Amino acid sequence: QVNFNQKIDYVFKIVLIGDSAVGKSQLLARFARNEFSLDSKATIGVEFQTKTIVMITKRSKLRFGILQVSGSDKCILQRCSGAMLVYDISKRQSFDHIAKWLEELREHADNNTIIMLVGNKSDLETLRAVPTEDAKEFAQKENLFFMETSALESTNVESAFLSVLTEIYRTVS
Ligand code: GDP
């Protein structure tokens, strides 16, 4: 059994940014209800708008706080370890705005911030306005991780968050 009174070794913050209505809060809600583990045990504690995820690994105990911000709060961006740039695959405009969000992020966030491009609402395939290849190309060019998710159908939500968390973990271990 895990003792959660144990000392926490690291605290990280992940922000979700992107246009409104792309599904940021649903992604977070979907993820926060799931349990996951990296290489041993994990659990999730939810508090207010900030989701705190405690990940116990073989070597250390990590705490990830996930914040969802609609605007681009400079102070929040400065202190995040990871960022998810979210767009809606059925809304071309939300993808076109990603470059602007990225610029904002690069301006304020630390150079080591792990960034993932997330195309949400992959269940709306019939309404798709952003080809997967376009997003992949953009991600490659900008050196971002990339994944398509559906908060509705729970597709790839956990793996998207886990990938970001794992990459952050890699940079400190
Ligand atoms: P936010 O403003 O980016 O936080 O967006 P929300 O999480 O509030 O979601 C906006 C709308 O999109 C809501 O009506 C959600 O139910 C819907 N939505 C969110 N994620 C998905 C998804 O994966 N698929 C579909 N079809 N709808 C979604």
Image (tube, rainbow, N blue to C red):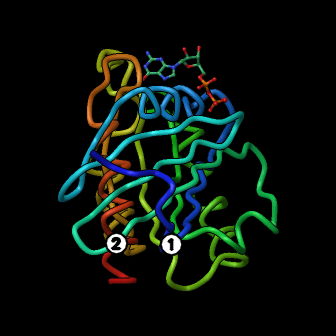
- Please determine whether, in this image, residue 31 is positioned above or below residue 7: above
- Residue 110: % across, % down: 61, 82
For the residues labelled 2 and 1, the Cα–Cα distance comes to 8 Å
Task: Give coordinates of residue 2: x percent, y percent.
Answer: 33, 49
Q: In the image, which disc is placed on residue 153?
A: none
The residue at label 2 has a CB less than 8 Å from ligand 1:
no
Helix or strand or loop: what does disc 1 sit on?
strand
Crowding around mark 1 (Cα neighbors within 10 Å: few <14, some 14 to 19, many 20+) is: some
Would you place residue 11 above or below residue 123 in this image?
below
Under 8 Å from ligand 1: the CB of mark 1? no
Image position, residue 172 (x, y; %) = 39, 83
Which quadrant is the N terminus positioned in?
Answer: top left
Left or right of 134, for residue 6:
right
Q: Residue at x 70, y 67 (%)?
A: 77
Question: In terms of depth relative to the viewer, which is nearer, 162 or 5?
Answer: 5
Residue at x 27%, y 28% (from the top left corner): 155
Ligand 1 found in image quarter: top right
Q: Which residue is mark 2?
A: 60
The reply to whether the C-beta atoms of the residues labelled 2 and 1 are less than 8 Å apart is yes
Find residue 156 and report its image quarter.
top left
Q: Earlier in the sequence, mark 2 or mark 1?
A: 1
Q: Position of residue 24 (x, y in %)?
A: 57, 35
At x 66%, y 43%, the residue is 50
Residue at image mark 1: 10
Type of the residue with mark 1: Tyr
Q: Could you say which quadrant of the image residue 126 lies in?
A: top left
**Residue 61 vs residue 138, the one in the foreground:** 61
The amino acid beneath tag 2 is Ser
* Residue occupying image coordinates x 34% and y 36%: 157
Nearer to us in this view, 171 or 93: 171
160 is higher (above) or lower (below) than 28: below
Residue 2 to residue 44: above or below: below
